[in-house]
Image (cartoon, rainbow, N blue to C red):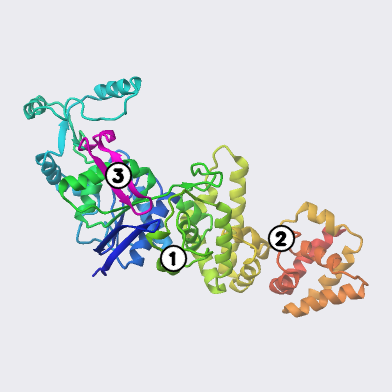
Amino acid sequence: MQAKVDFLKVRVRGRLVHSVSMSVRVRFAPSPTGSLHVGSLRDALFKHLFARHHKGANILRIEDTDRARYSAEAEQDFIDNLHWVGIDYDEGPHVGGPHAPYRQSERKEAGIYARWIDEFLKLGHAYKAFETPEELVEMREFQQVNRQPVGYFGGLWRDAAPSQAEDAERAGKPFVIRQRVPRGVTIAIDDAIRGRIEWNSDTVDDPVLIKADGMPTYHFAAMVDDHLMGITHIMRGEEWISSAPKHAALFDAFGWERPIFVHCPVIKGKDGKKLSKRQGDTRVADYRADGYLPEALLNLIALIGWSPGGDREIMSIQELIEAFDLPGLQPSPGVFDLEKLRWMNGHYIREMAPHRLAASLRAYLAEPGTKAYFLREAEADDALEQGRREVWDGLSSLAVGLEEGAALATKALAMEQGRVHTLSEFGEATAFFFQDEPPMDAKAVEKWLTQPHVPVLLAHFLAWATGMSALSVEECEAAVRGYAEKQGLEKLGPVVHPLRVALTGRTVGPGLFELMSALGPARMAARLARAVGAAR
């Protein structure tokens, strides 16, 4: 049973614009023609947070009336990735509910829209229009040449006699059904973010409600469904503001109470331009495959166009639910910041307990999408493709390490946990732990293994490690410091750097003493023996 929100108040700039007693009901209503992207995820997230904050209902409705572009695979992509981020639904095609069916194609087949369009025609708020596509093109060209508002404002059929329309229909002429937008009046809405917005109805064109193939358009199906499903808030992008007077007029013409309109700001890149793939307009599935955590992705996206107040940035999903409400939404565009997402993701990784981190990586590596992402062909960029394959090679080593050497893998993850920003970076960061002969960086070898004192240094530690069963961090530190002191070295660098290159093939990595202890005497001895040869 849905909880009641008594006297829900919506204020814009401190002014009361709506006050009504209602049970909050919102809907995420995608048209699945492609994969779930950042903008759609934010749309779904805002509705999820708002519904949960008010203990209301969050509904999934599939708007699939464009059958030529609809994709069942895209719908499944939406479902899978929304589930991955933790957005769930109280009603929808996959969970059922009292307003089923929840796919508009099925609702059309059930005759729901036919009933209401017949009613709308009888009320005189809609009419049949028989223009051919060529005639509509001529109309638009005439409007453009004469600098008139472009759109369908009545044509020949808005005020045609009933008999004229009947004759055209009997003759078999194709037609659409258009809304008869009232003329000579002001249409206004109270937007929860932007306040009162007004239109001269003479500038609002008559939209198509039913297409020539009998399929309803968004302008009709979505509004009818919103009424029948008891939607209290139409939350959508600001690109729909221009359609708001048509939708408000439709609700008024039917005599239905309007939902509250909430037009959310667009998302832009850091350069202030429309969000592009380069700036972060990427499939959610790609962020998932690249090793971003759902909590980090949701945290960042929640803050694009909404403010919780204060300086809060890192917020759990429960904290977001508790804080999210309409007054925090901003009218100005929000910015998607990839670098900030990386920072947030790194923060969440560092907060993970070792067992949860290992479990998350196992699940991440087992997902088919992870391998497919890194092994897919790059578009005219061989270097990018090669880089992805190298990442996957590292991840493959980590997968083997997690299965065959859980103790070493846990230590390796803990040592790199503070340095990586995504799960995918653990592959390259930890690869040398699990490789019998990690590749040696040529510049590192040239810089550190060719110095005169290094052969003796490596031989000493090879003899020290041989035959040992285990070494603590403290024992490793004592050995390194003792050797430096015995050689009269004031600093540890001449000992630490050659040992690091010998053991990892790199010049950077986790703390040397922890590294030596984690690798253990046998692995150290094998790598030091190889490095002795490289140092001569």
| Marks 2 and 3 in Cβ contact (< 8 Å) | no
Q: Residues within 10 Å of mark 3 (few under 14, many from 20)?
A: many
| Marks 3 and 1 in Cβ contact (< 8 Å) | no
Q: Give the amino acid at mark 1.
A: Leu
Q: Position of residue 302 (x, y in %)?
A: 45, 58
Q: Is residue 83 left or right of residue 170?
A: right
How far is the residue under mark 3 from the one under mark 1? 29 Å
Q: Give the amino acid at mark 2.
A: Glu
Q: Residue at x 64, y 68 (%)?
A: 412
Residue positioned most to the right = 488
Q: Quadrant of the C terminus?
A: bottom right
Q: Nearer the viewer, residue 192 or 459?
A: 192
How far is the residue under mark 2 from the one under mark 3? 65 Å
Q: Give the amino acid at mark 3.
A: Ala
Decide which of tag 2 and tag 1 comes sooner along the chain: 1
Q: Which residue is mark 1?
A: 320
Q: Which residue is mark 3?
A: 244
Q: Residue at x 60, y 61 (%)?
A: 426
Q: Is residue 205 left or right of residue 460?
A: left
Q: Is residue 481 left or right of residue 128?
A: right
Residue positioned most to the front = 15
Element marked by disc 1: helix
How far is the residue under mark 2 from the one under mark 1? 47 Å
Element marked by disc 2: loop
Point out the frontmost of discs 3 and 1. Answer: 3
Q: Which residue is mark 2?
A: 437
Q: Position of residue 81 (x, y in %)?
A: 41, 56
Observer able to see residue 92: yes
User: Magenta span covers which residues?
Assistant: 182-210
Point out the frontmost of discs 2 and 1. Answer: 1
Q: Residue at x 62, y 70 (%)?
A: 414
121 is within the stretch colored magenta: no
